[in-house]
Image (spheres, rainbow, N blue to C red):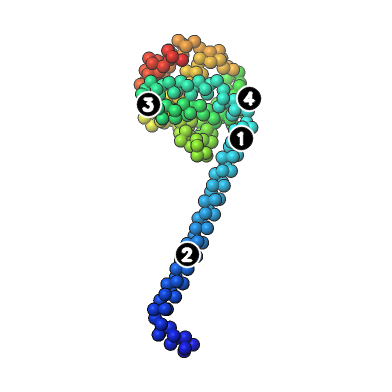
Amino acid sequence: MKLLIVFLTQNTELTFKLYERILTIMLILLSSVFFVIILYDLSKRLTHKRSLFLDDMRYFLENSTLKSIVSEDHSQKVAAISFAIAEAMGLSKKQQEEVRIAGLVHDVGKMRVPDAILNKKEKLNEEEWAIIKNHCKIGYDILLSMDKTKSMAKYSLQHHERIDGNGYPNNIQGNNIALFSKIISIADAYDAMTSDRAYRKAMTKEQAIVEINNCSGTQFDPSIVKVFTKSVVTKI
């Protein structure tokens, strides 16, 4: 022991180099441990997200209601009309494409609404109507859960809100409603009115335009209604 102390005190430079190497090795080891921990955590998160994504995609592919919602004529028309409105408003090409996709998936929440309610010919009761209205929140949760669609979630949530605050699900109004949701709202209403439904026959184009104009400033944004009726409806 005495010889070791003498050796260390007489070889100060060597001792410092030894300490330096030991510290360097310890730092490398600690960094490696932290790196492994971070990788493990990221792996778990990515695995979880991938699992959610695959579960949703599997559900999408297996669920006949969803397939009909996304590929049905209504969604395709809403997407096309929304795109045309955005184009007429002078929005950027990127925004035009975004609102088109948002229009395509706006009703995705209906995948969890029973077919018996969606296709009911009689008037819905209060409980059934509450289920229908919840499709906006369901669509929001579905789209928000996937990276590629999370930017569309808000538009699905708000597409049944009204300018006067009497819409659903959150009774927001005016400028609190996203622009794309306001656009989709008009496109959705127009196509719904001019299409046959289980509970009624389709309106004529002229009747639908009158109804949309009548709801300008209450249900719909007046500036978008003006663009739609003046520049878009004649082209669809």
Q: Secondary structure at mark 2?
A: helix
Q: Secondary structure at mark 4?
A: helix
- Which of the marked residues, 2 or 3, is nearer the chain's N terminus? 2
Numbered badge on residue 119: none
Residue at 54% from the left image edge and 50% from the top image edge: 43
Q: Are marks 3 and 4 in contact (CB under 8 Å)?
A: no
Query: What is the CA distance from the residue labelled 4 to the residue labelled 1?
Result: 19 Å
Residue at 59% from the left image edge and 36% from the top image edge: 57
Q: Secondary structure at mark 1?
A: helix
The x and y percentages for residue 96 are 42, 26
Rendered position, 11 above or below 231: below
Residue at 46% from the left image edge and 66% from the top image edge: 27
Query: What is the CA distance from the residue labelled 2 to the residue labelled 1?
Result: 45 Å
The x and y percentages for residue 190 are 47, 18
Callout 2 amino acid: Ile
Query: What is the CA distance from the residue labelled 3 to the residue labelled 4?
Result: 39 Å
- Which of the marked residues, 3 or 1, is nearer the chain's N terminus? 1
Numbered badge on residue 28: 2
Q: Which residue is mark 3?
A: 91
Callout 4 amino acid: Ala
Give the number of the mark in front: 2 or 4: 2
Callout 3 amino acid: Leu
Whether residue 60 appears in this view of the structure is yes
Query: What is the CA distance from the residue labelled 2 to the residue labelled 4?
Result: 63 Å
Q: Residues within 10 Å of mark 4 (few under 14, many from 20)?
A: few
Instruction: Report which quarter residue 131 is drawn in.
Output: top right
Give the number of the mark in front: 2 or 3: 2
Q: Which residue is mark 4?
A: 116
Give the number of the mark in front: 3 or 4: 3
- Which of the marked residues, 4 or 1, is nearer the chain's N terminus? 1
- Which of the marked residues, 2 or 4, is nearer the chain's N terminus? 2
Q: Which residue is mark 1?
A: 59
